[in-house]
Image (cartoon, rainbow, N blue to C red):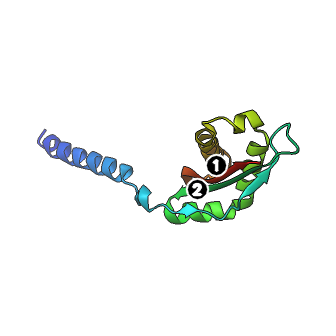
Amino acid sequence: MQGAPCRFPVLIGLLLCFNACASTPKYLKEDCPNYTEIETLRVNPAGAPTRHLRLKAIFKVCPPTEGLAEIKRKRIEMKHHLIVLLSAKTTAELEDPLRVEKLQKEILQIANQKVMKKGEVIDVFIADIELE
């Protein structure tokens, strides 16, 4: 029974160490870079062959090195998913006053569910949007 009191503090110490180590990221989200290399997209909205939507999206990716490398490798895949999303939008959806916020959420979801596997897009910025 003398060994039991000694094992208890060691067990608590190990649990605290594992808990602290597991929850500490290796980077700060503020340090994650913005990926700007997908050019401005121009698509026809659904049901409007004579109208055009122009959109420039910027992606904040983490972790800084791995996330940026992944989105650079998957640039064409990301562009494809953006074109599919945007060309499915109707002019009514694109004239909605909350269109930018809705597009941000949808683009973020597509980026993380369909494109990014190791990294993560933590924010999407709409730098330019125009319905012509």
Quarter assignment of residue 39: bottom right
Image point (26%, 47%), residue name: 16
Mark nearest the camera among 2 and 1 is: 2
Q: Position of residue 87 (x, y in %)?
A: 79, 44
**Mark 1 neighbour class, 10 Å CA radius: few under 14, some 14 to 19, many 20 or more:** many
Left or right: residue 102 versus residue 49 is: left
Residue 72 drawn above or below residue 95: below
Task: Give the image location of residue 35, x and y in percent.
Answer: 59, 62
Q: Secondary structure at mark 2?
A: strand
Residue 35 or 101: which is nearer the viewer?
101
**Mark 2 or 1 closer to N-term?**
2
Residue 11 point in image, percent of width and height:
24, 45
Q: Is residue 72 above or below residue 18?
A: below
Amino acid under disc 1: Ala
Amino acid, disc 2: Phe
Q: Residue at x 75, y 38 (%)?
A: 89
Which type of secondary structure does the marked residue at label 1 adopt?
Answer: helix
Residue at x 57%, y 50% (from the top left corner): 124
Q: How many marks?
A: 2
Residue 111 badge: 1
Q: In the rendered structure, find residue 59 and report the number of the disc placed on it.
A: 2
Q: Are marks 2 and 1 in contact (CB under 8 Å)?
A: yes
